[in-house]
Image: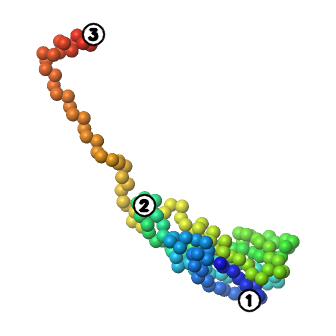
C-alpha cells in the first residue's frame, strides 16, 4: 500500500520517494519490478496537492515475436485533496478528491497502480524486432501440381466422342 500519513506532513512543499513492492500495489510481480514512486506534496490549510511520478521495469511480450523482454515504463498523475463542500477548480490536476478532517491518511495505492498499468505501451515491440520478417505462410509447402503427360494422338478421336 502507498499511504501518506497526514499527521507526519508539515505545512508547505515536501518530497517523498517510495519503493513499494508489486504485491503491495496488487500488481503481478512477474511483470513489474523495481517500482519507484516520487511524490511532490504541497500541504496547506487542510488541502493537499499530490503530484506523483511512478516508474518500473516491466516484462512484456513482444507483439511481433511473442518473446519476453524488459522495458522501463513511467507515468505521472496529479491529485488534489480538499475538504468536502469546498469549490475547487484546478486545471493542473487530473482528479479532485475529498479530504475529511477525521482522515488520518490518504491512500495512493490505486493511483500508483493505475499509473503504471496505463504506462504500458499499447504496441509492445522488442528492440530490434521491427527488422525481423514476419512469416506469412504456415504449414507444409504446397507441392506443384504435376503436369499432365502428353496425350497419345491416337486417343484424340475417342476423347472427342466422349465430349459429345
Q: Position of residue 48 (x, y in %)?
A: 76, 80
Q: Earlier in the sequence, mark 2 or mark 1?
A: 1
Q: Is residue 106 left or right of residue 71?
A: right
Q: Quadrant of residue 148?
A: top left
The disc placed on residue 66 is: 2
Q: Callout 2 environment at 10 Å: few (<14), some (14 to 19), or many (20+)?
A: few
Colouring style: rainbow
> Residue 53: x percent and y percent?
62, 77
Q: Secondary structure at mark 2?
A: loop
Would residue 97 be visible to someone looking at this image?
Answer: yes
Q: CA distance from mark 1 to mark 3?
A: 102 Å
> Residue 50 occupies which quadrant of the picture?
bottom right
Residue 76 visible within the image: no
Disc 3 to disc 2, C-alpha distance: 59 Å
Q: Reading the chain from its start, which is encountered first: label 3 or label 2?
A: 2
- In-front residue for pair 12/126: 126
At 24% from the left and 35% from the top, the residue drawn is: 145
Q: Is residue 118 left or right of residue 88?
A: left
- Which residue is denoted by mark 3 in the rendering? 164
| Relative side of 133 to 19, left or right | left
Q: Secondary structure at mark 1?
A: helix
The residue sitting at 74% across, 88% down in the picture is 9
Q: Is the residue marked by circle 3 packed among few (<14), some (14-19), or many (20+) residues within 10 Å?
A: few
Give the residue pinned by disc 1.
8
- Asked if residue 123 is positioned above or below residue 78 in the image, the reply reads above
- Determine the CA span between mark 2 and mark 1: 47 Å
Amino acid at each position: 500500500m502507498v499511504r501518506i500519513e497526514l499527521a507526519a506532513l508539515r505545512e508547505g512543499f515536501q518530497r517523498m520517494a517510495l519503493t513499494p513492492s508489486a504485491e503491495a500495489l496488487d500488481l503481478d510481480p512477474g511483470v513489474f519490478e523495481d517500482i519507484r514512486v516520487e511524490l511532490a506534496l504541497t500541504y496547506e490549510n487542510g488541502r493537499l496537492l499530490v503530484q506523483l511520478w511512478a516508474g518500473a521495469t516491466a516484462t512484456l511480450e513482444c507483439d511481433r515475436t511473442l518473446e519476453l523482454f524488459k522495458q522501463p515504463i513511467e507515468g505521472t498523475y496529479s491529485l488534489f485533496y480538499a475538504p468536502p463542500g469546498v469549490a475547487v477548480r484546478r486545471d493542473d490536476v487530473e482528479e479532485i478528491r475529498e479530504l475529511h478532517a477525521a482522515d488520518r491518511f490518504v491512500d495512493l495505492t490505486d493511483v500508483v497502480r493505475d499509473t503504471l498499468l496505463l504506462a504500458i505501451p499499447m504496441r509492445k515491440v522488442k528492440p530490434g524486432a521491427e527488422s525481423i520478417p514476419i512469416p506469412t505462410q504456415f504449414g507444409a509447402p504446397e507441392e506443384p501440381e504435376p503436369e499432365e503427360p502428353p496425350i497419345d494422338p491416337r486417343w484424340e478421336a475417342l476423347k472427342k466422342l466422349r465430349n459429345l
